[in-house]
Image (cartoon, rainbow, N blue to C red):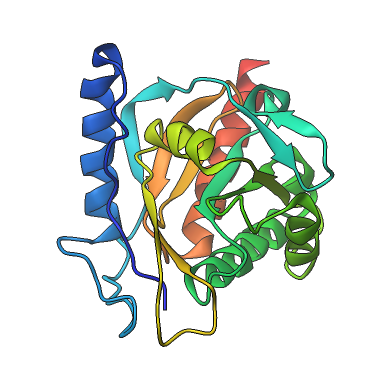
Amino acid sequence: MTRLLYPHQSQPGAERLAPLLALSLLTMLLTGCGALNNVVAGPTITPAPPGGTVLESPRNLPDFTLTAQTGDPLSLSDLRGKPVLMAFGYTHCPDVCPVTLAQFNQIARALGEDRDRVAFVFVSVDGQRDTPERLAQYLRAFNPDFIGLTGDPETVRLIGTDYGVYFEYEQVAASQADYLVAHTTSWFLVDAEGRLRIIYAYGTPPEIVTTDIRAMLTQDEGAL
């Protein structure tokens, strides 16, 4: 079972430390991780809050580029103009990631005709195993329109600091997998201008996220 983690920092520059620390503490509260859960016994998942946590000041996110499941480079800025619902995880994840992607698909279906106006992004924290081909095969089982991104672990780790995301690799003797990856399980809603707006705890009801995305799309229409 996946061990749920709260985020740590990867020694960012001093000018970024304060906002990243605040974001990490916020994500820690959302994931309900006052202590680390045992990876063999499985996670004790605290029920998600009734809604996401809206950042009082939307946070401008640095651009990044990783490799998409198509094999082509893709940058966060390439998705500008659409809200982005993002999660970090990996294809060998035994529990949390399949649930997350299934719930993302529920959100996509609930959006109906507005679905194409939103990008759903799954960032791999396991670049060694999650090749573009592996990501493409995995995401097809949930929704072929979802975007998978992969890259070397240190690059992804640096990107994760901007979201308060942390992950670590663990050898588990009782598992058939070569190793498991304990990782932050929060979801992140980025607006069409590339700003982090809302953080959701794992397991937030899809209808809540759908409502927030619809409100964001309506705001974008009003700004035109």
**How far across and how far down the image is residue 40, in percent?**
34, 82
Question: Which quadrant of the view contains residue 135?
Answer: bottom right
Q: Position of residue 181 (x, y in %)?
A: 45, 62
Task: Identify which residue is drawn at 27% across, 12% down.
Answer: 15
User: Which x, y percent locates residue 19?
Assistant: 26, 24
Q: Please, is residue 23 above or below residue 80 in the view? A: below
Q: Quadrant of the C terminus?
A: top right
Query: Residue 81: x, y in percent?
Result: 69, 24
Q: Residue furthest top?
A: 15
With respect to residue 81, does 167 lie above or below? below
Q: Residue at x 59, y 25 (%)?
A: 64
Q: Nearer the viewer, residue 31 or 41?
A: 41
Q: Which quadrant would residue 4 be assigned to in this image?
A: bottom left
Q: Is residue 103 left or right of residue 205?
A: right
| Quadrant where the N terminus is found in the figure | bottom left
Query: Can you say whether 163 is above or below 183 in the image?
Result: above
Residue drawn 52% across the image and 34% down it? 155
Tell me what residue is drawn at x 58 percent, y 40 percent. 152
* Left or right: 206, with 6 as reference point: right
For the image shown, how many numbered marks are present on the structure? 0
In the rendered structure, the answer to whether residue 202 lies left or right of residue 30 reads right
In this view, the residue in front, 56 or 218, is 56
Tell me which corner region of the image, top left, top right, bottom left or bottom right, holds residue 67.
Answer: top right
